[in-house]
Image (cartoon, helix red, strand yellow):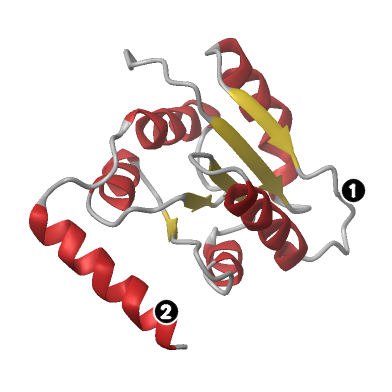
Amino acid sequence: MEWEMVKIKVFLGTDHRGVRFKEDIMKHLKDNGIEVKDTNIPNDPEDDHPDFAFKVCEDVLANPGSVGILVCGTGIGMSISANKVKGIYCAKVDDVDDAFYAKNHNGANVIALGIKHEKEEIFNIIDTFLATKGPSGEKYIRRINKVIEKERQA
């Protein structure tokens, strides 16, 4: 995929099911000039996806302009956990269209993926998310601001 190279930092978290893609994702990002940081939380069959999601989200919030990528069995648990962190807008994505809309229409700063995808499809999803510009359309910004306001009220 041809995409504009931008200075972006990616934080990656994978639980015991998602760990099978961790090294491949890290290599793919590094090979494309993207700085990537792993959570450095050890993986084992009893690890818990919220630990990885919370760590990635804390890192994203501490590094403005960065994004997070989470990988677990389905992406569902990671996305639910990530969205409990104030200031995080995580989308569970299944294809490149989801990745585009997550960022361009909804301002996602984190995506969650499941392991049902082939490695190349995961790369395409990640590349699309990273290459997509944030929301600029008035209606998207209006909608995002409504979500932010609701979050402030919580």
Residue 22's spot in the image, x, y percent? 70, 35
Q: Nearer the viewer, mark 2 or mark 1?
A: 2
Residue 73's spot in the image, x, y percent? 63, 57
Residue 44's spot in the image, x, y percent? 90, 53
Q: Residues within 10 Å of mark 2 (few under 14, many from 20)?
A: few
Residue drawn at x 49%, y 35% is 122
Give residue 28's mark. none
The residue where tag 1 is placed is 42
Q: Residues within 10 Å of mark 1 (few under 14, many from 20)?
A: few
The residue where tag 2 is placed is 151
Relative vertical location of residue 137 with respect to residue 1 in this rendering, above or below: below
Q: Which residue, as the protein is rendered here, is positioned at the far left?
A: 138
Q: Residue 26: which quarter of the image?
A: top right
Separation of disc 2 and disc 1 at Cα? 32 Å
> Which residue type does callout 2 highlight?
Glu
Residue 61's spot in the image, x, y percent? 59, 53
* Disc 1, SS: loop
Q: Residue 121: which quarter of the image?
A: top left
> Which residue type does callout 1 highlight?
Pro
Report whether 116 appears left or right of 99: right
Q: Which residue, as the protein is rendered here, is positioned at the far bottom?
A: 154
Q: Nearer the viewer, residue 86 or 16?
A: 86
Q: Nearer the viewer, residue 95 or 8?
A: 8
* Disc 2, SS: helix
Residue drawn at x 56%, y 21% is 34
Relative vertical location of residue 35 with respect to residue 121 in this rendering, above or below: above
